[in-house]
Amino acid sequence: MSAMGQTTGGATTRRLFAALVREEWRLHVRLFGGWRFAGFPVVIAALATGGVLALETTGTASGTIITGLHVLALGFGLYSGTAAFAGSSMLENVFGRLSLVLSTAGTLPLSRRRLLGLFLLKDLLFYALVVVLPMALAAVPLAATGTLPFPVLTGVPLLWLSLTLVFAAGMAVTVALIAARSRNVPVWVIGLTGVILAIGVWTTGLLEPARGVVVPMSGSLSTAVVLALGTGVISIGAICAFNPTDGRPTQRVVAGDRFGRIRDRLPTGSRTDALVAKSLLDLTRSAGGVWKPFVSAGILFALVVGLVGVVESITGIEPAPGILFGGVLGLSAFTTYNWLTQFDSLEAYRIYPVSITDVFRAKRLAFVLVGAPAVAVPYLAAVLWYEATLLDALVGAILLGGYGLYYYGLTVAIAGFDPNEFLFDSVRFTGFTVGIAIPLVPALVAGFVTPAPTPEIAAALAVGGLGVGALGYALSSWAGPRWERQYRAGTASD
């Protein structure tokens, strides 16, 4: 390539990146009316600061708090990397109503891999400022009082860089997995490789060095440099290996037959079966297919495993695995519902003789069909791996089902058909967080304090799980008519 061509390509790349950043900013500011989006980082900072102070009050060591922040950043990076599923699908013209810049790959001579790379870089910058920076600011009170071994002015910025590096590493790993899937690497090969690596790290004494990598600011400069270089190499390699075509045309050709087969196999026989089949078909047609909810649940599972290891190493207490994993894995209800609505919109149903209430009812059944196996697999793995007692496993299963349905109903009631976008609204995000914390915190306390639940505690948790499950069903039933009224009145975004 000539020097002039390289210069032109560099200028185009910079303009594309600037356009993606402007589009992200305008989307959120206009969607939430300005201050409600600006308040989102403030809410994150308040929640993180509250959590840090609560841990410090209970006597948790400062090093453990810093490690916990890095584990959260890593887990969030792994989850955020799944945004590449949406990005790659946008490039395939399955979805382009929100990102007009990405959809230009279908009409302009632009490299799809370059667009996807810039999209991920934009996401890294966005989350580093909106989410990771408020997390780092949570350390300010402890640093100011001398609880942490670094000063505010130099230590907190260093903590932000350390958290951002771990967050980027998590994103890179997820994008690499997506690239492998786009090259038709079987899911079982990816899963088996992950299991072998996890067992290898666990059994060969590399767990402690791995923890050093997860917290770059506590290790040497060379370790951080190696992590940064490794993240860059993995990211560039994944984008180069990513197959932007990924068999989508073939899937569209056979879509008609698949729709009929899915609809005929649904067990309900109700009038919404066609809508349920459409939701499932949309999910399978998007990049990553039906495995996306399993990946999201797997990331949550890995995060809980890491937290359990940290707690055990500090306190020597083995938590009740059934209660702990049952309560936390239910949180994947949000991501599962997000995947079911990611490539769909209520506006698309205006041409059909169906009500919005029926659409929400169909989404609930699709959520159960997809979400139940997505969380059942990691839950069974947890209770078997940690050798949960029968009572603990049964209570955990009730919590898993009840909490999952409650989180789903809460999400639908607050966010409607756009959970990913509306939860950047500080007002709704605060309500969602409080709604989650009310049932989850008691379950977490019970899981960590009582390794072997007594019959009384087990009965109380089971009743609570059934109760919030019923509440979640009621919320999801109420949400359909509510959103239908708001869409008809044109106030759905208020």
Image (cartoon, grey):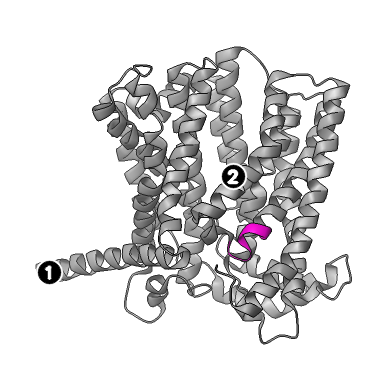
Examine the structure image and report whether residue 414 is included in the region drawn in magenta.
Answer: yes
Q: What residue appears at the point 32 percent right and 73 percent down from the top-left corner? A: 110
Q: Quadrant of residue 484?
A: bottom right
- Quadrant containing the N terminus in the rendered view: bottom left
Q: Quadrant of residue 104?
A: bottom left
Q: Which mark is residue 31?
A: none
The relative height of residue 339 versus residue 50 in the rendered view (above or below) is below
The image position of residue 420, as x and y in percent, is 54, 58
Q: Label 1 to label 2, Cα distance in Å?
A: 54 Å
Which tag, 1 or 2, sits closer to the chain's start?
1
Any part of residue 1 in sight:
no
Looking at the picture, tell me which residue is in the foreground, 160 or 262: 160
The image position of residue 150, as x and y in percent, is 30, 21
Q: Residue furthest left?
A: 3
The image position of residue 70, as x and y in percent, is 44, 32
Any part of residue 93 in sight:
yes
Q: What residue appears at the point 84 percent right and 67 percent down from the top-left corner? A: 266
For badge 1, the amino acid type reads Ser
Looking at the picture, tell me which residue is in the foreground, 73 or 432: 432
Count how many numbered circles sit on residues in the image.
2
The residue under label 2 is 433
The relative height of residue 396 versus residue 432 in the rendered view (above or below) is above
Instruction: Describe the element under mark 1 as helix, strand or loop.
Output: loop
Q: Which residues are magenta?
A: 412-418
Looking at the picture, tell me which residue is in the foreground, 183 or 356: 356
The image position of residue 447, as x and y in percent, is 71, 25
Q: What residue appears at the point 34 percent right and 23 percent down from the top-left corner? A: 143
Categorize mark 1 by other alpha carbons within 10 Å: few (<14), some (14-19), many (20+).
few
The residue under label 1 is 2
Q: Quadrant of residue 35?
A: bottom left
Instruction: Describe the element under mark 2 as helix, strand or loop.
Output: helix
